Image (tube, rainbow, N blue to C red):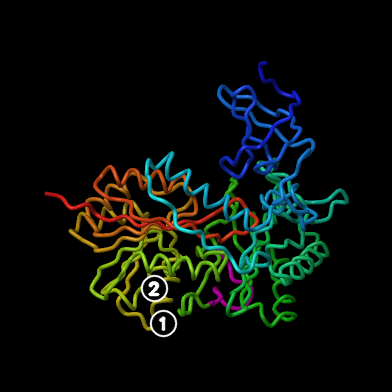
Amino acid sequence: MELAKNQEHTVTIEGYGEGGMGVARIDGRVVFVHGALRGEKCRVLILKTLKSVAFAKVLEVLEPSSERITPDCPYFPRCGGCTYRHIRYEEELRLKKQRVQDNLSRIGGSDVTVEEILGARDTLRYRNKAQYPVTTDKDGRLTCGFYAQRSHRVVPCTDCLLQPDTFGELLREILKLANERHISAYDEASGKGILRHIYLRRGYHSGEIMVCFVSSKPDPKFQSIADILMKNHADIKSVILNINSKNTNVIMGSRCITLGGSDTITDIMCGNRISLSPLSFYQVNTAQAEKLYGIAAEFAALTGDEDVLDLYCGAGTIGLSMAGKAKHITGAEIIPQAVENAKLNARENGIENADFICADAGQAAKLLCDKGRAPDVIITDPPRKGCDALTLDSIVKMSPKRIVMVSCNPATAARDCRCLADKGYELQKVRAVDLFPGTGHVECVALLSKLKSD
């Protein structure tokens, strides 16, 4: 029978596909089922058919898996933030490790076995940052929350189980103050209104909080809110107004105005004091990030004699965590504020064997390569899209002994590992680390070594 939209079928879930969807087969055709678990028998509705696969949703779970649990969040699955609130954490870890392994095999063409995934001790309230899109409710008052999956429709939520309790308390106070001042929410369709996002960041170890308003333009009403927040909360050390006037789905603009306190907050990462601006990249799960960087350091196997290049370095956290075991660290990052943070972080921690350049990773790698730089170890921590061709080509030309790749996207990591393997590097080991319990994201660290050549 030909599969068609709106058909109902009874299926058995054989395993998991990309993004944690259940995989079933109907007359030999693969069907991805949202919200279904391995081993379950389900009645499903076909949502979409493509040439080789189809997509469906669960109408009824006829024989539930022992791994299925009752979701602990009232917003799940309407909110698009979490993927696995209906699964025991042990099964979530197995699923994520398998995802890394499948990508490595299918995209990377590698037979390397992924090492045991490193799960998180805390699966709730672990995030140190949240960015809440702002909208208006049916009464015309400001509200905020998170986007529904694959949409820009805001699901109102001021108490996310992944965020610290204090974020919810602050959020409700900020909304009250903003509503009292009749601050308007930015509307993507019309371009009218001003408040786009409320962005909160908190130091995991320090407890210092940054409040950032992302607005389409400056407005003096934000200053009065900043004054009240600074007065009411001793742990708020910075209030920033970020200006983003562009018609874009990129959250942050490049211009920041400090309304209260300092331009940055501080935290501790791997024993180093870290200064963070609103635009600095900083892993959202500090406790797990420290373990992730520990694995990266283990893979780098530094002895004190190595010249290390840290690409996509952000505020310098990875490179600076290894500086004590390296001869020299050079970090490259495209965001100017993050580079300034990295330089400050090196100074404040008394690290004298590190320098940082502001450039795109590919351009920075090419520049250093053209200057004859020959690092012993190169570390990369790219965004989800992975490394571009220029970066990979320049890395290979510098001929490092080892490449340590930290990635938040196993698919692009596998692709980049395959490219490097084609250019003379051997993938030696990979380990997955769960920095984002409850969500569909997983980090991994890969070690590649240069093959001996004639």
Q: Amino acid at mark 1?
A: Asn
**Looking at the image, which residue is at 31% across and 52% down?**
363
**Looking at the image, which residue is at 63% across and 33% down?**
24
| Tag 1–tag 2 contact (CB < 8 Å) | yes
Q: Main secondary structure of the magenta part?
A: strand
Residue 51 as seen in the image, left or right of residue 3? left
**Looking at the image, which residue is at 17% across and 58% down?**
372
Residue 48 x %, y %: 67, 27
Residue 301, above or below 399 = below
Q: Which residue is mark 2?
A: 320
Q: Earlier in the sequence, mark 1 or mark 2?
A: 2
Tell me the crowding category of disc 2: few under 14, some 14 to 19, or many 20 or more residues within 10 angstroms, Cα based: many
Q: Quadrant of the N terminus?
A: top right
Q: Residue furthest right?
A: 139
Q: Which residue is mark 1?
A: 349
Helix, strand or loop for disc 2: helix
**Looking at the image, which residue is at 52% across and 47% down?**
99
Residue 329 as seen in the image, left or right of residue 29? left
Q: Which label sits on residue 209?
A: none
211 or 156: which is nearer to us?
Answer: 156
Q: Amino acid at mark 2?
A: Leu
Residue 432 x %, y %: 48, 57
Q: Residue furthest left?
A: 454
Residue 408 x %, y %: 49, 54
The magenta region covers 256-267
